[in-house]
Image: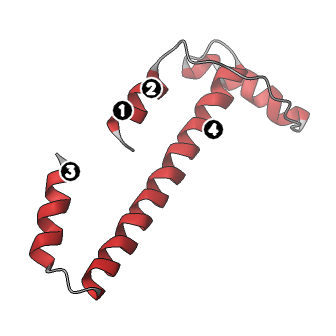
Amino acid sequence: MKIETLKKRLKSNRPMKSVTLRMPEDVVEELKAIAPLLGFSGYQPLIRAYIGQGLRQDLEKLEESNVLELIDSLKRQGVEETIINNALAEISH
């Protein structure tokens, strides 16, 4: 995930939007029980943390996939591997 995107996600004053989510009652009760044990003020912040964690993992996988597809395309078009490696090293810093 790009550092600027991550910085925006860490801001506490980000705009919020209400959503309705139907969940089994036993799951909600378990979330309520475990939230304070994990240091959360309630089950809703815990749900947001779980969703955010999964979302970041999926976004990272997709970004990696796109980069790999781009690398393969560049190789097929005759771009030298050293040039590709130099470009990857440049954007990694």
List x then y, in percent, for residue 50: 61, 36
Other-residue count near label 2 (Cα within 10 Å), few / some / many at <14 / 14–19 / ≥20: few
Labelled disc at residue 4: 1
**Residue at horizontal 16%, vertical 45%?**
93
Instruction: Name the residue type under label 2.
Output: Lys
**Residue at horizontal 67%, vertical 20%?**
16
Marked residue nearer the N-terminal end (3 or 2): 2
Q: CA distance from mark 1 to mark 2?
A: 6 Å
Q: Nearer the viewer, mark 3 or mark 4?
A: 3
List x then y, in percent, for residue 23: 86, 37
Reply above or below: 32 against 88: above
Quadrant of the frame with the N terminus: top left
Task: Determine whether the residue tagged by mark 1 lies in a helix, strand or loop.
Answer: helix
Marked residue nearer the N-terminal end (3 or 4): 4
The residue where tag 3 is placed is 92
List x then y, in percent, for residue 30: 76, 30
Check contact, mark 1 vs mark 2: CB within 8 A.
yes
Marked residue nearer the N-terminal end (3 or 1): 1
Q: CA distance from mark 4 to mark 1?
A: 20 Å
The residue where tag 2 is placed is 8
The residue where tag 4 is placed is 51
Q: Nearer the viewer, residue 36 or 43?
A: 43
Q: CA distance from mark 3 to mark 4?
A: 27 Å
Reply above or below: 51 against 59: above
Instruction: Name the residue type under label 1.
Output: Glu
Image side of residue 29 versus residue 72, left or right: right
Other-residue count near label 3 (Cα within 10 Å), few / some / many at <14 / 14–19 / ≥20: few
**Residue at horizontal 17%, vertical 61%?**
87
Instruction: Name the residue type under label 3.
Output: Ser
